[in-house]
Image (cartoon, rainbow, N blue to C red):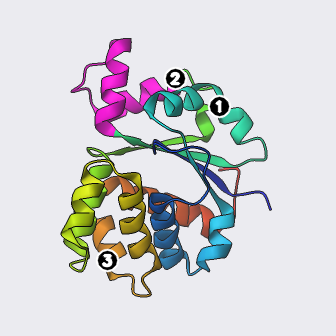
Amino acid sequence: MTPFAVMLYEDQRGPEKEFGLHNLVVACVADDAGEDFFALRRKLDGRPMKGVQNLLRSCRRDIRRLSSKGQQVFAIIDNDAIRHQLKHEGVAEDAEDAAVVRVIKEKCDAPERLHVFLLKENTETVVEAAEHCDKGLPRSLVTQALQKDVNARDAIFNRIAWQSERAARDCIRQRVEAILELVKALTALVRGGDRST
C-alpha cells in the first residue's frame, strides 16, 4: 500500500518506523478520522531524520522522490532548531513563521507537495503538554524526556497514543498548535483519500 503522506520528523534516531511522537500523531488522526490506528499507520509513513540539518536537506532535495506516487510530505520541525539553522542563511531568528516556511520551501524540489509545521518551541513543548494532560505520568520520566532522552519521550508519547480514551491526546492538541494543525491537515487528507492535493 502506498502511504497517503510521508511525515518527516527531526527526531534524533535512525531509520525507525515506529516511534513515540509519530504514534501520538497517528492516534490523534485516528481519533478524528474514525480509522483503525494500525491501518492508519500504514497510510502515514513517519520518518525520523536524525536532526534538523538532515530534515532541512530532505525538504530541499528529496520531496519529489518522497512524493513520487502523489503523496503529500509533512515536515514537523522544532522551531528553535530551524531558526538557528537558517540563521546561517541570513534568516533572522525572530523572523515571522511564514518567512521561515518560505525559506525552507523556496529551495525545495517540489514545494507544492511540502507542508511545514513549526513545533513551538521544540519537542520538549509536547512533553510538557503531555505532563499537563496526563497527571499519571511519573515526574522522573518527564525529567528524562526533557533532557532529550528519546526512550523516555517514546514511553510518554506511546503511553498517551495507546490510551483508549482520547482526552489526553485532545488536551495535547489544544496546548501545541503545530500538533493541532498537523492533525487537522492529515485528517482532511485521510478523509478525502486524496494523495494529490
Q: Who's the residue at 62% across and 56% down the image?
A: 17
Q: Who's the residue at 70% across and 40% down the image?
A: 66
- Rendered view: 98 above or below 26: above
**How would you rate the neighbour count of disc 1 (Cα within 10 Å): few for under 14, some for 14-19, many for 20 or more?**
some
**Residue 15 horizontal side relative to residue 153, left or right:** right
- Type of residue at label 2? Glu
Q: Which residues are magenta?
A: 79-106
Which badge, 3 or 1, comes first in the chain's sequence?
1
Total marks shown come to 3
- At mark 2, the secondary structure is helix
- At mark 1, the secondary structure is loop
Q: Are marks 3 and 1 in contact (CB under 8 Å)?
A: no
Which badge, 2 or 3, comes first in the chain's sequence?
2
- Which residue matches tag 2? 106
Q: Percent position (x, y) of residue 112?
A: 60, 37
In front: label 3 or label 1? 3
- Type of residue at label 1? Ala
